[in-house]
Image (cartoon, rainbow, N blue to C red):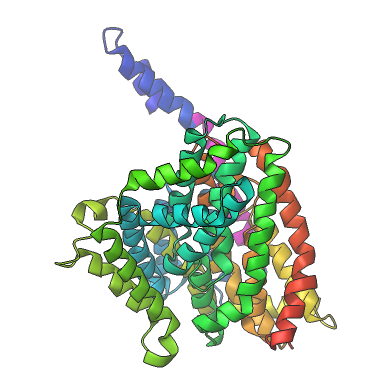
Amino acid sequence: MLVKKFLCVEPAHNSILSRQILLEVIMIQGNWWKWALSLGLPTIVFFATPEMEIASPNTPLFFAITLWAVIAWAIEVLPSAVIAAILTFLYALFVTKPAVAFSSWCTFLPWMCFSALIIAQVLNRTGLGKRIALHSMLLMGSSFTKTLIGLMCAGVIMTLLVPSGLARTVIFVAIAQGLIEALNVDTKSRMSSALIMGGYFAAIAPGLFCLTGTEMNLLALQVISDTTGVSVEYIDFIVQMAPFSVFYMAFSIMMIFIIRGKERLQNEDDLKTVLAGRLKEMGPITAEEIKIFLVLLVGFTAFVTEQWHHLPGAFVFALVGMACFMPGMNLASEQDLRKINLSFLIFLAACMSIGAVAQDLNIPKWISAHMSSLFEGRDAVMAISFSYMLGVVVNFLMTPMAAVGALGSPLAQLAVTLGLDPYTLVYSLLYGLDQLLFPYEIGYLLYTFMSGAVTLRHIMGAFAIRMVAFALFIPLILVPYWKLIGFLK
């Protein structure tokens, strides 16, 4: 149709319109393979899926629809939110009951993330996150190494307060960009890549320090709780994960030196002056910063004290976030609401729907029954290592959020079958999903590359080293620690 339209354009017509139509034709012709791949492979899977005694008869259709969505997300045939909506509608129409397909909206996670996005918008506007980071770096000292450590410490503080990896990435990458500009660092140099990744690691590496560290942690909690009925308290998560997370953060700092290579910061002596100057530019702390800090403190307290007040901490946090709009607070307005990326919530809910529908079709039990035979006669270390490697491999094929939604339930079921705590295998999966090589694998890293101050070839070696190293560190360090505290028997 577009070809015909293009051929019928009169010479007298606007040449800009003609070029636009031609570009549309080229784009459609160039994307035909994406549609062929996203529709062809699911069709093969639908007809090739064998009968499953335990699972529902609708399982082949579920696999086909889910595979279509995963491929479509990976190669971007449509906007991610549109794919997510189509996925959910197809589930509701042809696979299961609408109440199951849309059940994710009745859970805490979309609403908590909605609140977190509002708070992130306020944090960016008030500058509180930037102030915390600058203070932390100044307190640690003026050298390159001490500045990175201070940046990571600020990352831990922000991780405790802000349950959104993307929000923290925006804050810390902006700080790193400011340092690059102030110190006149070449944006194509290894030093520029090191500083930007210092901001990225400060935002993301502490993600497994606490339960609210990333959206994936919260999604995993929801999936496992729905599958096994077993939940985890905020304090318990810190005991189980925080010590190894500190080691993970330290290793991430070491990666920055690998990325930097032989380059040195030419103006390192001016680093303290630059940081102090940036802080001075912000002026004295404002009433808005104090207000948003109090909001975050109440939200954090709600999580930590959940076992005593018996109110769902996540919903309390979501409600506290709405306080930003209340009279007297005046921290957020309708204009802030319009800037929030609501499409992320649709994508998040769809990822949760994958797990909910799979659970309804009894698929996790079927997968667990087949996977457990692979581990018959093998110990827990083998299963935990397998879960980590599964996360590493799957990361190349689908987003981490979708991977947690699809694999969280089967792994939890497998852990129960093997006599393990259902969270052990999923915790290991989360570490595997944090191992990256390419920006497309997760939105946080993709946003970091949008800064234009990081080069892929500078960081790939460091990421590969971490990927291999933690395949060894998890069984050699994390597993013995879990045995020490009685989490793993």
Query: Residue at position x 49%, y 57% from top?
Result: 136
Quadrant of the rendered image containing residue 53: bottom right
Quadrant of the rendered image containing residue 406: bottom right
Q: Nearer the viewer, residue 273 or 29?
A: 273
Quarter placement of the N terminus: top left
Query: Residue at position x 55%, y 87% from top?
Result: 230
Q: Is residue 300 above or below residue 136?
A: below
Query: Residue at position x 47%, y 45% from top?
Result: 275
Magenta part, dominant SS:
helix
Is 111 magenta? The answer is: no
Q: Is residue 143 above or below residue 350?
A: above
Q: Tell me if residue 113 can be seen.
A: yes
Quadrant of the rendered image containing residue 140: bottom right
Quarter placement of the C terminus: bottom right
Q: Position of residue 155 (x, y in %)?
A: 51, 59
Count of marks, rendered view: 0
Q: Is residue 64 above or below residue 147?
A: below
- The residue sitting at the left extreme is 327
Q: Nearer the viewer, residue 60 or 332?
A: 332
Q: In the drawing, does residue 1 fall left or right of residue 368?
A: left
Query: Residue at position x 42%, y 75% from top?
Result: 100
Q: Is residue 250 above or below residue 230?
A: above
Q: Position of residue 242 (x, y in %)?
A: 60, 73
Q: Tell me if residue 39 can be seen.
A: no
Is 39 magenta? The answer is: yes
Q: Position of residue 232 (x, y in %)?
A: 53, 83
Q: Position of residue 46 (x, y in %)?
A: 60, 61
Q: Nearer the viewer, residue 461 or 38?
A: 461
- The residue sitting at the top extreme is 12
What segment is highlighted magenta in the picture?
Answer: 29-48
